[in-house]
Amino acid sequence: MGVQRAENNSASSERVGDLEGFGVAVVREDGRWKVKALAAAALTSLRVAEEELRALRSAGAFFGLLDVDDEFFVVLRPAPSGTRLLLSDATAAVDYDIAADVLEALNIEVPDIDPDDLDDVEPWGEGDMSLLSDLGVPEPVLAVIVAETDLYPDEQLGMIAQRLGFATELSGVLDKLPR
């Protein structure tokens, strides 16, 4: 997949309606997976996504999956010690505020890439590749999924869902979202 960017996306916090993609909360309780759509604002604000996930107050494992503008994905897993994060494409931080916020939270600088040169730069992931290991997606497997840059983010997230066993639940939620 060639990297395409939304035009002038630096004002993304004002353009929530223009972004494609989805955000979902994934919860494991009583041995079953539950998937719930997050507000559209979660696609532009890491803080909003974290707040929505923390509000779930689940006793079981929970995390969020964000497909932002069909360009990259974010996996976030709030914990008492801080939110564990994974960004599938660090170059997205050049154009997208939420990607820059993820890198900032990871103490990683936004890549110094001219926006006009983004199509020529191979994307790379940043963050905690082991954040889903305890649930069934080991670090090497997640690293391979992130490295599959020929796939769209929804396909990569679908691979994670398949691996963990909630692909049907994810599909059910996505089918109900306006697109």
Image (cartoon, rainbow, N blue to C red):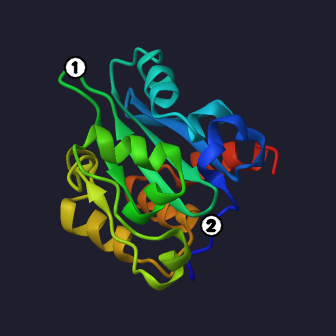
Q: Check disc 1 and give the amino acid type.
A: Pro
Q: Position of residue 97 (x, y in %)?
A: 51, 44
- Callout 1: 10 Å neighbours few (<14), some, many (20+)? few
Which residue lies at the image location 67% right of the left edge and 56% below the top edge?
Answer: 8
Q: Is residue 63 left or right of residue 12?
A: left
Tags 1 and 2 in contact by the CB under 8 Å rule? no
Q: Is residue 84 left or right of residue 123?
A: left
Outermost residue, right side: 178
Which residue lies at the image location 41% right of the left edge and 19% below the top edge?
Answer: 54
Residue where numbered disc 1 is placed: 80
Q: Position of residue 125 (x, y in %)?
A: 32, 64
- Callout 2: 10 Å neighbours few (<14), some, many (20+)? some
Residue where numbered disc 2 is placed: 5
Q: Quadrant of residue 146?
A: bottom left
Q: Position of residue 112 (x, y in %)?
A: 35, 64
Instruction: Give 109 or 90, whichever is nearer the viewer.
Output: 109
